[in-house]
Image (cartoon, coloured by chain):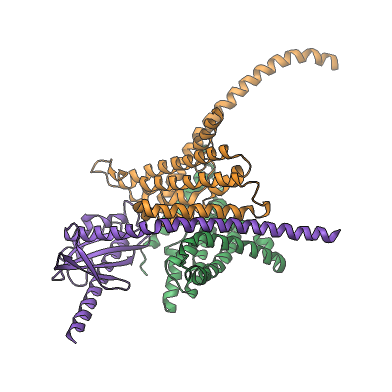
């Protein structure tokens, strides 16, 4: 159980597909103009990711090595079309808002990358957990970006006014230019956090090494005398 | 559509509705393969080639295979298969007959299958009900827009290598912010009415 | 010996092809099945959006509509019970992110009663504001060919989306005029 929790955390934070692995940039940039769209896109992609991971893992012995990419793409696009058909029947307004980006889940690099790197090599259960983790990580990143963009660009979150009336929305944030920049600053923040964590770890290991070295040197000195 | 309209549509696809800066199609290669201007240009040329041909082929597949049988809902599956096969075929063809071009484009060709610009241009062609000539012109023009964006961007990035940003901004964040500035420049076209 | 190796190779690649074909066939089959399950609900959704828009414009729960002209724009006559209370036209024009589709309502005297956006893909927080009543209410009571800036003010920062709505309204008015004059001409003969 612990192993799966760790795997979930891996997808959500440590190895977040969007913020750390930098995959799936097109939907990240395009659908984060509002929190609602970002959330919908994230969940749709998560659904496809879980299903495709499940089936590719099930079929990993059946799919011939030579045509595996084609096979993965067909399976993924099948699920995407299924999600599209279901969405337009049961979540019509969300379907209208996401428009052309639903079929483009097919070429979302995250899904193909997880199929190739994880699901094709691992049993069913870990593959599903991987799909859930990575999918939620993607959704989390999307919502994070969308919160910043919607709040600054329109003064609202989920369509509800948050900023005071006097706040003049900075339209640039809902425009394409704002998408690139918001993502840039968020990833910079992530790098900062990771750098600090790494720095801490490095200092800790240096400290430890010095300790080890000291005890080592003490024992070495005697040996050196012998070799000289 | 008259020739004038086709030209206007092409102009708009290159600048006003630039795939990268207005629609975010094809951002992965745009951010990933723009380290150096010459590799960026190579990628752009490979994409232009594939997008023009795939515009024609997917149009034909939709018109003659899917629409007559009422299978429009299978278009995503069919298009991605066509594009994957096409990329594979072009790769084999170039390797055999135009080795010089193959060695120039070689490594970028397989990447194009997962370039969403190609799939989305095929889907847009169907959505906008283009004729065959329009489909080919649109695919070509949209790809030229992509090439323009990625080449200009690679030029900027090659300059940035000498910059010394704060540590947290090194690499990807700085790239994205540069892309944002370039997108701002391109957004001045969005007011152009055609 | 060599021949059997070669034959094995052919059989192998044939098997690969067959497997891929099988996957494709299954995927296509499953999608077709889901499509047949959901197609009806999708039609209903589209119809419901249109009906809601018409109901909202005329302030009625369920007006009866009759299609009188179809093409790029569809023209309906709207009845409350048996009395003709107006006309509705469905039209669309290209905006920033794609087509902006409208339902435009006219009274029996052909004055603009109201406009409702039924589908659009404009930028949320910007172009999407054209779907809000603050913008759309400006069209109420207008007549003839409209020009953005004269009587109707664009949403600031979203000229393209505002222009799309105005264009679509003008298209709708034209379509209504042609449909009605054709109908009258037909009755006259």
Which residue is rendered at x = 31% and y = 56% of the image? C127
Which residue is rendered at x = 13% and y = 71% of the image? C109
Question: Would residue A161 appear left or right of B178 to someone viewing this image?
Answer: left
Q: Which chain is green?
A: B
Which residue is rendered at x = 25% and y = 41% of the image? A164
Q: In which quadrant is the C terminus of chain C drawn?
A: bottom left
Which residue is rendered at x = 57% and y = 59% of the image? C25
Q: Is residue A148 above or below residue B132?
A: above
Quadrant assignment, res B22: bottom left
Q: Position of residue A85 (x, y in %)?
A: 43, 55
The residue nearer to you, when weighing C181 against A21, is: C181
Quadrant assignment, res A165: top left
Residue C30 visible in the shown view: yes
Q: Is residue A82 above or below residue B95?
A: above
Q: Position of residue C67 (x, y in %)?
A: 25, 70
Q: Position of residue C81 (x, y in %)?
A: 15, 64
Q: Is residue A161 above or below residue A88?
A: above
The residue nearer to you, when weighing C87 against B107, is: C87
Q: Which chain is purple?
A: C
Q: In which quadrant is the N terminus of chain C drawn?
A: bottom right
Q: Which chain is orange?
A: A
Badge count: 0
Q: Position of residue A220 (x, y in %)?
A: 77, 15
Residue B23 visible in the shown view: no
Q: Residue furthest bottom?
A: C189
The residue nearer to you, when weighing A111 against B38, is: A111
């Amino acid at each position: 159980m612990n192993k799966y929790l760790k795997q979930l955390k891996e997808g959500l934070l440590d190895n977040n597909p969007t913020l750390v692995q930098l995959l799936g940039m097109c939907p990240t940039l395009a659908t984060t103009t509002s929190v609602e769209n970002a959330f919908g896109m994230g969940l749709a992609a998560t659904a496809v990711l879980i299903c495709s991971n499940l089936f590719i893992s099930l079929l990993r012995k059946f799919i011939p090595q030579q045509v595996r990419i084609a096979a993965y793409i067909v399976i993924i696009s099948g699920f995407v079309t299924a999600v599209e058909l279901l969405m337009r029947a049961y979540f019509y307004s969300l379907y209208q808002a996401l428009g052309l980006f639903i079929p483009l889940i097919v070429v979302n690099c995250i899904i193909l990358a997880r199929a190739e790197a994880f699901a094709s090599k691992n049993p069913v259960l870990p593959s599903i957990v991987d799909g859930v983790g990575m999918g939620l990580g993607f959704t989390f990143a999307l919502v994070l970006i969308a919160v910043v963009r919607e709040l600054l660009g329109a003064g609202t979150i989920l369509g509800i006014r948050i900023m005071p009336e006097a706040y003049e929305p900075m339209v640039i944030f809902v425009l394409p230019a704002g998408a690139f920049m918001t993502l840039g600053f968020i990833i910079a923040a992530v790098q900062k956090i990771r750098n600090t964590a790494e720095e801490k770890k490095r200092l800790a290991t240096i400290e430890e090494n010095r300790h080890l070295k000291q005890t080592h040197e003490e024992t070495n000195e005697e040996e050196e005398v012998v070799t000289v | 559509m008259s020739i004038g309209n086709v030209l206007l549509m092409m102009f708009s696809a290159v600048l006003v509705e630039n795939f990268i800066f207005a629609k975010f199609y094809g951002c992965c290669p745009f951010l990933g393969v723009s380290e150096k201007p010459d590799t960026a240009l190579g990628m752009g040329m490979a994409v232009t080639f594939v997008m023009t041909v795939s515009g024609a082929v997917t149009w034909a597949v939709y018109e003659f295979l899917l629409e007559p049988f009422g299978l429009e809902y299978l278009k995503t599956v069919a298009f991605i298969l066509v594009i994957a096969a096409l990329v594979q075929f072009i790769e084999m063809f170039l390797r055999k007959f135009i080795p010089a071009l193959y060695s120039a484009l070689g490594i970028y060709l397989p990447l194009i299958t997962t370039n969403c610009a190609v799939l989305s241009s095929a889907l847009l062609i169907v959505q906008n009900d283009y004729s065959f000539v329009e489909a080919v012109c649109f695919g070509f023009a949209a790809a030229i827009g992509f090439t323009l964006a990625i080449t200009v961007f690679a030029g900027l990035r090659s300059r940035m290598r000498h910059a010394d940003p704060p540590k947290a901004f090194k690499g990807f964040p700085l790239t994205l912010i540069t892309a944002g500035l370039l997108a701002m420049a391109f957004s001045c076209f969005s007011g152009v009415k055609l | 010996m060599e021949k059997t190796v070669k034959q094995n190779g052919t059989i192998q690649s044939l098997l690969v092809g067959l497997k891929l074909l099988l996957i494709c066939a299954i995927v296509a089959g499953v999608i077709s099945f889901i499509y047949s399950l959901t197609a009806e609900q999708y039609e209903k959704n589209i119809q419901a959006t249109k009906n809601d828009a018409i109901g909202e414009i005329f302030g009625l729960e369920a007006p009866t509509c009759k299609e009188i002209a179809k093409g790029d724009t569809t023209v309906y006559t709207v009845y409350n019970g048996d009395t003709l209370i107006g006309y509705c036209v469905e039209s669309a024009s290209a905006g920033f992110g794609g087509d902006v589709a409208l339902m435009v309502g006219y009274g029996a005297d052909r004055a603009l009663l109201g406009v409702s956006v039924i589908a659009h893909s404009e930028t949320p927080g910007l172009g999407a504001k054209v779907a809000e009543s603050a913008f759309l209410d400006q069209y109420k009571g207008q007549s003839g060919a409209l020009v953005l800036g004269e009587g109707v003010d664009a949403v600031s920062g979203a000229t393209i989306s505002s222009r799309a709505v105005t264009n679509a309204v003008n298209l709708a008015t034209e379509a209504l005029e042609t449909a009605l004059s054709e109908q009258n001409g037909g009755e006259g003969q």
